[in-house]
Image: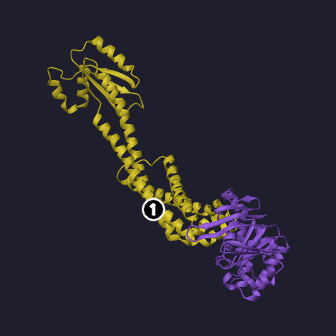
């Protein structure tokens, strides 16, 4: 479903971010992407999201290949990819329900469909009671749940999470991680980028990809 | 209400001053074009009326042979531009002069010799009154040996045509300059709107909105601003027309086609300015 084939990425100012990285993520897989900050985790996620193009090599996601994909196809591909960030990236002037609905509105969904789906998504992340709350009225963990609900709005095949627990306390981290696990159990692949090795250690059953200075230095599936 | 329209109208509420400034600039540019449009249209109407009365008069030498004159009259009548050729004999000319210049009648009565020459009055077909056509007929009529002189009021015909061209060019240059400024201001308004909504745009991109979907509200905002400006310009122009028309001149309002073109021009200016700003600045988000 996701294939990195000898991918390197060089940015004009910051230099080499990824160096000859190859791996594959299958449908419904759960996978940690670890490494120090600056190791290239975010670059991997941006390449999957087709926000950047590799300098060398090829990235394939759900049948689309970097370099060949057209702008309109990028939009269509992104509807199949959920994305959450450390800083949540919610619209502060909209309620939780409106933030989730936004992801459906921009893809042209009908109002009646949006209403039903938003209710279901907020229930799924445990925030049905706070649908009308604004981000400023929610805790960090709750804001991240809204972001996850938004990421799931278009029924993605993969959920990308870039340090999703970086701003959360231990309890909220646990809650968000459990949410990711249940999303994965329902069939959505999850790629979770984190430098929180404690979180990785506590969940040692999952695949781990480790990056160091842009190179893939460890893949738990190939070593086992 | 569709998403793009709702967002475009929301932009008016969010930045009313900037939107107002954009619409005012477009209205100023089109107002200038409108004023010159009224001038050009009315000059054209005057010209059309004057043109109908333009005729070429060929004065004949006194020693012209009658058969040669008749032949020439028939020949000139076959020119493609010519409607009819009247022969005015010397006696008829004197008679006409007496009628037209009543107060000098006694003077003509005392003359022993008729000083007036015979002439052809060459009337032109409708639509054949352009200076170069009139000049061509005059030249061909003047080529006959017995034609002494040809007159057709060339200078003032040229002047009216020149005036019309100058009015048209001035409208284009001044209106164009205002339009350029209007486009820059609309561009700035759209850039500010994009900046104010950069988070929203980033999230639209994140969740897979197409570029067209992201751009549409901004294009619509530019279009509506332009249309508003054009409507304002039309109102100002009409006001000036009413004031001038009642008090100073008898003016005609511009044709409906021009009015519609003005409105369309406003919309196109607005959407063009937005498109340029949106394309450039969305790439940076």
**Residue A168 location, x and y as percent?**
71, 85
Image quadrant in which the C terminus of chain B is located: bottom right
Quadrant of residue B215 in the image? bottom right
Return the residue nearer the eye: B127 or A35.
Answer: A35
**Residue denoted by label 1:** B25
Residue at x 42%, y 49% (from the top left corner): B37
Colour assignment, chain A:
purple
Q: Secondary structure at mark 1?
A: helix
Question: Where A92 falls versus B267 (above or below)?
Answer: below
**Residue A224 location, x and y as percent?**
83, 74
- The 10 Å Cα crowd at callout 1, few under 14, some 14 to 19, many 20 or more, is many
**Residue A193 location, x and y as percent?**
72, 76
Furthest-top residue in this view: B67
Side (left or right) of B132 relative to B200: left
Which chain does the yellow colour mark?
B
Residue at x 29%, y 15% (from the top left corner): B69
Quadrant of residue B48 in the image? top left
Return the residue nearer the eye: B229 or B55.
Answer: B229
**Residue B249 location, x and y as percent?**
36, 50
């Amino acid at each position: 479903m996701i294939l990195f084939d000898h991918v390197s990425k060089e940015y004009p100012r910051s230099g080499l971010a990824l160096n000859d990285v190859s791996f594959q993520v299958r449908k419904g897989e759960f996978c940690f992407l670890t490494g120090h900050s600056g190791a290239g985790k975010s670059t991997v996620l941006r390449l999957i999201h087709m926000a950047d193009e590799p300098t060398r090599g090829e990235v394939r996601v759900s049948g689309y290949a970097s370099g060949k994909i057209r702008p309109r196809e990028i939009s269509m591909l992104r509807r199949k990819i959920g994305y959450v960030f450390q800083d949540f990236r919610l619209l502060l002037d909209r309620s939780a329900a409106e933030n989730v609905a936004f992801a459906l509105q921009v893809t042209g969904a009908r109002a009646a469909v949006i209403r039903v789906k938003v209710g279901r998504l907020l229930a799924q992340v445990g925030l049905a009671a706070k649908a009308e709350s604004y981000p400023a009225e929610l805790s960090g963990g709750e804001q991240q749940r809204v972001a996850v609900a938004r990421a799931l709005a278009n029924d993605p095949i993969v959920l990308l999470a870039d340090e999703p627990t970086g701003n959360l306390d231990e309890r909220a981290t646990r809650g968000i991680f459990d949410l990711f696990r249940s999303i994965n159990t329902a069939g959505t692949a999850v790629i979770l980028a984190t430098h929180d090795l404690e979180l990785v250690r506590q969940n040692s059953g999952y695949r781990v990809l480790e990056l160091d200075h842009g190179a893939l230095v460890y893949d738990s599936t190939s070593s086992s | 209400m569709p998403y793009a329209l709702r967002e475009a109208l929301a932009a008016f509420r969010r930045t009313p001053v900037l939107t107002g400034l954009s619409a005012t600039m477009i209205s100023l540019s089109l107002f200038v074009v409108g004023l010159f449009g009224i001038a050009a249209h009315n000059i054209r109407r005057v010209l059309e009326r004057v043109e109908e009365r333009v005729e070429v008069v060929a004065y004949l030498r006194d020693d012209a042979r009658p058969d040669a004159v008749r032949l020439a009259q028939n020949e000139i009548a076959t020119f493609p531009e010519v409607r009819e050729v009247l022969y005015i004999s010397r006696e008829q000319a004197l008679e006409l002069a007496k009628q037209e210049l009543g107060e000098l009648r006694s003077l003509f009565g005392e003359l022993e010799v008729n000083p007036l020459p015979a002439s052809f009055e060459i009337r032109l077909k409708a639509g054949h009154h352009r200076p170069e056509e009139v000049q061509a007929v005059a030249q061909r009529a003047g080529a006959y040996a017995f034609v002494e002189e040809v007159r057709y009021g060339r200078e003032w015909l040229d002047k009216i045509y020149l005036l019309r061209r100058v009015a048209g060019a001035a409208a284009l240059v001044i209106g164009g300059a205002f339009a350029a400024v209007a486009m820059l201001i609309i561009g700035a308004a759209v850039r500010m709107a994009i900046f104010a909504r950069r988070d929203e745009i980033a999230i639209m991109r994140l969740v897979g909105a197409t570029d067209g979907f992201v751009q549409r509200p901004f294009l619509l905002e530019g279009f509506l601003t332009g249309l508003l400006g054009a409507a304002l310009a039309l109102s100002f122009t009409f006001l000036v027309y009413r004031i001038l028309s009642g008090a100073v001149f008898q003016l005609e309002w511009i044709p409906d086609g021009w009015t519609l073109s003005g409105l369309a021009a406003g919309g196109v200016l607005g959407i063009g300015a937005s498109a340029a700003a949106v394309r450039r600045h969305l790439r940076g988000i």
